[in-house]
Amino acid sequence: MNNTKETLVSAFALFSLFFGAGNLILPPFIGFNSGEMWWVMAIGFCLSAILIPILGIFAHAKLQGTIFDFGKKVSSTFSLVFSFCIYIIAVALPSPRTASVTHEIGIAPFFDTPSIYTSIVYFSLVLVFALNRSKILNLLGKLLTPAILIILLAIIGICVFSFDFSFGASTIKNPFTDGILEGYQTFDAIAAVVVGGVLIISINLKNKDISYTDRKALIKNAGIFAGLGLLFVYGGLILTGALMHTSFDSGINRTDLLNGISRTLLGHEGNKFLSILVSLACFTTAIGIVTGTADFIKGRYNNSNKAYTITAVISCILGIVMGQFNVDYIIIVAIPALMFIYPITIILIVLNVLSDRYTKPKVFRAVVYTTILFSVPDFLNSIGITSVSNFTAEYLPLSKFSLGWVLPAAVALIIGNLTYNKNTTV
């Protein structure tokens, strides 16, 4: 296989990794509410939903390791705690959200069934597949993304050529920073850290006949192409939501908006087809999260199959409990967890992308600890404790936008490199 073809194949694999079915509900809703400022919010959204995850792939290409390697310059204990937090969040939030999306898009519009029934059946099937792995799921996953992509391109194309380019007033106070925070809800930075390493190893194995330098270049080029693909789709869906601002009630929720857009532009049968595809894609995503988490615990307990089974069962029970709630509720519940883990994840990605010359262990630790410290006010604010954030908002730039950790982390990196003797070993 020539390098150009392999780059495109790898780019599509990366695109599929980040473009989950749950992500479909976010961009149209952003555009619908941001109105004339849709492009500003799109830039913010794409920074956290595209740029950071792609940088995560670049970091994996450099590290050639697993999630543990992202925090190894801090300490092995930190890496272990960080990994546990990531996996707990994964099975508690994005995995149940797939069941909720499936119910609201694939079940509720056609059947009068309580969401708890959908959640029970859904995660019972997830458990069956997680305990009995099948290559059919991998094949299904490869077919679903192209099919969904074709339908989305049809939606974007029909909307762009059917609606006048007029936009309503924005209901978003800070579209750029709110776009960044909305991008957190894709969980794609976490996906890059957790699954990216497996994908990088697969790409390397397929191309082991070429040099390490060429493999790194291939991965980076694939990342760039995947990022451009995501930019086109996310940007198109945000624009679609903005153009259709008069077509739906202002209080519409995310899944109803996606269903409404699909019905309006594709008709009832097209909407039904999209619902089936999205539901199947959600299902494969949930299986991937549950099996990935179970594999992680299995590895910590000497490859114990019992540990794998127990973890899979607990993950699915948690999925049933959380998956019965509506998507908007899960998104709200996820905010504190994301305010806690996302700044750490982002800074680990950025530090691992930078040259080792600027991220010596002592500097690395200083930046990570600074990030954790200054993200505490945002986390406390997200759970209703506003006294600390009210104080920092007056004195700390970006704090009022829930990004108070950004400047202190940058300052710690700069000061650390100015004061730290690069010849010192740690």
Image (cartoon, rainbow, N blue to C red):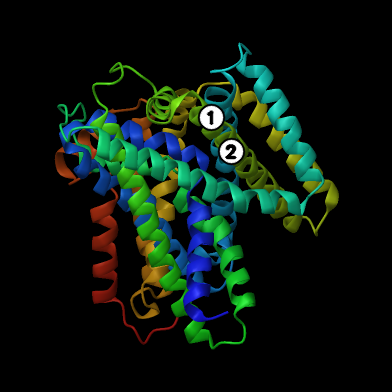
Residue 178 visible (yes or no): no
Tag shown at residue 282:
2
Q: Secondary structure at mark 1?
A: helix
Q: Are marks 2 and 1 in contact (CB under 8 Å)?
A: yes
Viewer-proximal residue, 51 or 295?
Answer: 51
Viewer-proximal residue, 357 or 171?
Answer: 171
Question: Considering only order in the chain, which callout, 1 or 2, is on the residue closer to the N terminus?
Answer: 1
At 74% from the left edge and 58% from the top edge, which residue is drawn?
Answer: 299
Question: Considering only vertical position in the picture, is 424 above or below 61?
Answer: below
Tag shown at residue 101:
1
Q: Amino acid at mark 2?
A: Cys
At 58% from the left edge and 64% from the top edge, which residue is drawn?
Answer: 199
Q: Amino acid at mark 1?
A: Val
The Cα–Cα distance between marks 2 and 1, rounded to whole angstroms, is 8 Å
Q: Residue 418: image x %, image y %?
A: 23, 75
Marks counted in the figure total 2
Q: Residue 273: image x %, image y %?
A: 55, 33
Relative side of 41 to 364, left or right: left
Q: Quadrant of residue 229?
A: bottom left
